[in-house]
Image: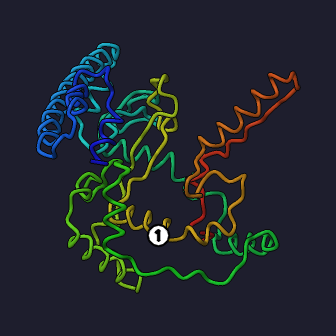
Amino acid sequence: MDAQQLILKDINRDDPMEATFLGISDLQQPSDFKVLVLLSKFQKSIHAKYLAEVRAAKKNFKKADQDAHLRDPLHRRAFKLIRGFTSSALSFLMRSVCGPDGEPVGSFTSNPAEIDATIRRDYDPIYHGNTGNLEEHASSFITRFLPFLYQDTEFVVQPIEGSLLMELCTHGPYSSGGMDGWAPQDWSVLPLQAFNWLAFLLNSIEDGAPWPKGTLHGKSSFLRKHPSNPSLKSTDFRVLLLLSILYRRWASYRLWSLQPWIAKWALDEMFAGIPGRSAEDAWWISSFLLENAHLANIPFSGGAVDIFECFDQISRVLL
């Protein structure tokens, strides 16, 4: 009876479906059977309402998606839909030197070998940097900035567990696939036993075993730095290196396992490499500060620094 009274208390009398319960309140001593009958009717009404809302939501989504395609004259959405989960290759590029048959600088090529040679010629100086001896350069950096570097006892990570690896892989992010043919979506449907074997493989690698040959190659994906600029110069693209899913998921797992160590040296001014923080947090904080200064009539100014091809020039030896 107490449960029945609680049900009656929460009835929304303005809702025609929930009003199904009102017959209970007219009974002097409603039996459990009568209450269950009314609950069954109510459950069917709720299910019907849910199905109707789902159909309406699908219809609205389909209409919104169609409208979005109509507002996309360059058909970017359609291309993204049909290309799948792998990034497309760079099909055209502007020549920075004369072509093999005397084609002038500024002409275009669709030859994969020539595109690859152009990319290598233009980006190799960036990747190689401006330091001849990387080991000496890294040692000099450590010696110079040692007083400012965080120092602590060695942080020991625990072996990789299949269940935790599975939890990480089944919740995204679902980015592009690598050259190994796997996509993140593929890993999201693997069973626990598969992740147990992957954990065994990764633990073996951390103990000194070599990485599988299929994971030793990366794929470059080219994104326009300025989407509104139709330039096909190699330097007008942002080159992203896509490694294998195995390597990326291992890196994500280890970043997660390093959270206690990161928390020891993380500063409020850091917005990269810190779990739960990103550049968007810095944008929001900056926006709030500027908005507050604007409302309070406080003069303000700002500046921005962009390091040329920053991530492409990071020294592996230093890391």
What percent of the width, then of the height, locates residue 148? 80, 68
Amino acid type at circle 1 is Arg
Q: Residue at x 66, y 58 (%)?
A: 130
Left or right: where does residue 108 sit relative to residue 288? left
* Nearer the observer, 65 or 223: 65
What percent of the width, then of the height, locates residue 46? 20, 32
Q: Residue at x 48, y 22 (%)?
A: 228
Asked whether residue 54 appears in the rendered view, the answer is: no
Left or right: where does residue 227 sit relative to residue 8? right
Q: How many marks?
A: 1
Quadrant assignment for the C terminus: bottom right
* Nearer the observer, 235 or 6: 6
Quadrant of residue 34 within the rendered picture? top left
Q: Residue at x 26, y 75 (%)?
A: 196
Colouring mode (rainbow / by chain / secondary structure / one colour) = rainbow
Quadrant of residue 151 within the rendered picture? bottom right
Task: Name the outermost residue toward the front.
Answer: 28
* Nearer the observer, 96 or 165: 165
* Secondary structure beneath label 1: helix
Q: Which residue is mark 1?
A: 254
What percent of the width, then of the height, locates residue 212? 29, 73
| As drawn, 220 above or below 104 | below
Q: Residue at x 41, y 81 (%)?
A: 159
What percent of the width, then of the height, locates residue 294? 80, 23
* Nearer the observer, 98 or 317: 317
Left or right: where does residue 154 sit relative to residue 169? right
Asked whether residue 149 appears in the rendered view, the answer is: yes
Quadrant of residue 68 within the rendered picture? top left
Tell me the crowding category of disc 1: few under 14, some 14 to 19, or many 20 or more residues within 10 angstroms, Cα based.
some
